[in-house]
Image (spheres, rainbow, N blue to C red):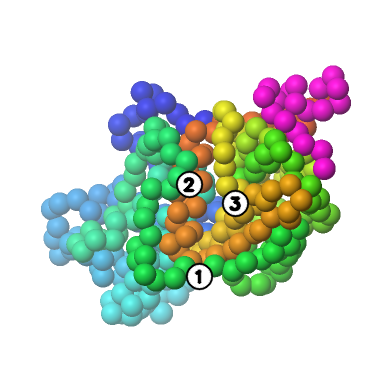
Amino acid sequence: MTQPTAYRPKKPGRSAIEAQVEKLCRHELLQGEKRGELLKYLVRIQREGRYEHPYSDQKPSPTGKRILFEFYKHWARNNGERDQWPTPEDSEEAGKKLIGELAEALDRYYKFVDDTLIVRISRGRGEGYEPDYSWRAEEVPVALIPKTALADPEEPVDCTYIGNNNAGVEYVIRRLRSSPDEEPRLMAIRDTHVRHQRLIQDHVRYAGIDAAFSQFLMRSNPETTVATMILGWDIDREYVRAMVGTAMMGQANQLKCFRLPRPTPLLNFILLDYSDLTTEVLYGWGQGKPGRPGAVFRSKDPRLVDEFNEFFHQLLGHAELVTFQRLLEAGPDGDAASAYPGLTLEGR
């Protein structure tokens, strides 16, 4: 749960910053390619006053070029490569790519992880890549339709028709089962799940989703939330129990479930986040009429993905964390609805 603003210090303290940085560096987005090492280095030199006046020959102005050169010297010294210190020009060329990857990794991390303390890297001219810290805004305006307009209405959006609901499930299973060596790797899944009161006659087949989800969780960081589900009031029991039941078998820290506090019309969609910092959206689940199998589409077009990213965060800002026990606990009639007030569990 987000910490109330009244109890937060105006400026994040050292212990809070260090704890957040350690958490960030454990995440797959910041592992490898010196991303985590660079973040820790920037935070440390900021704490030691590297960005503060006065400057001198021993402490030159912290330009981006200078800071990157100092980082690569620091990294070479700590890794026993003193004889391979780069020149300022070499370090600037490699460092600009590294700093861009780090900044993008942080942006992507905060798109699907609802941490209270946000760490960013300043990339403006003369900023020297100084870290910036802020508290996540607590109040999120209620909105069920994304507000951001598409940048160019004349340019077509790249979107592919997958098939009906079953074809959509099969596509997700293939992505969950993808090899750890496959690039880009699937790193996180963000799902919205509502099944409406009027049942779709077409049966959705979830066979294999639990095993595929287990494979995905087992190859992910066990300390990191890599799957998030926002549930409506009407949910498909078979699907939710497959996902939650799988996570409860030793991987509970990797899945978080949230519930919308009131019945809400919702276009079902799933966001798949990849190691190359791209996101794929699948949408249209369960939107068909009785007797029709539904239609699921997918897209990696940044304009469409940004709309669904915004939509997801609007929903998450108004959803309540719900425990696995409340989702799976059976009531007097053998159903779970009484343990989850107002919730309808539809049997397929």
Task: Give how far across and how far down residue 277 sits, in percent.
Answer: 50, 64
User: In the shown orientation, is residue 55 left or right of residue 178?
Assistant: left
Q: How many marks?
A: 3
Q: Residue at x 69, y 55 (%)?
A: 294
Task: Reply above or below: 193 against 30.
Answer: above
* Image position, residue 69 (x, y; %): 31, 70
Q: Secondary structure at mark 2?
A: helix
Q: Nearer the viewer, residue 321 or 254?
A: 321
Label 2: how many Cα within 10 Å (few below 14, some 14–19, many 20+): some
Where the C terminus falls, by quadrant? Answer: top right
How would you rate the neighbour count of disc 3 (Cα within 10 Å): few for under 14, some for 14-19, many for 20 or more? many
Residue at 73% across / 62% down in the picture?
167
Residue 149: within the magenta?
no
Q: Amino acid at mark 1?
A: Asp
Tell me the tag on residue 247: none
> How far apart in space, not on screen, are marks 3 and 2 (Cα)?
10 Å
Residue, x 57% and y 42% (percent of image)?
266
Residue type pointed to by label 3: Phe
Nearer to us of marks 1 and 2 is 1
Q: Could you say which quadrant of the image residue 123 lies in?
A: bottom left
Q: Where does label 2 land, which residue?
A: 311
Q: Secondary structure at mark 1?
A: loop
- Magenta range is 331-348
Q: Position of residue 91 (x, y in %)?
A: 34, 75
Residue 158: mark in rendering = 1
Question: Sequence order check: which comes first, mark 3 or mark 1?
Answer: 1
Q: Can you see residue 272?
A: no
Does the magenta portion include 340?
Answer: yes
Q: Are marks 3 and 1 in contact (CB under 8 Å)?
A: no
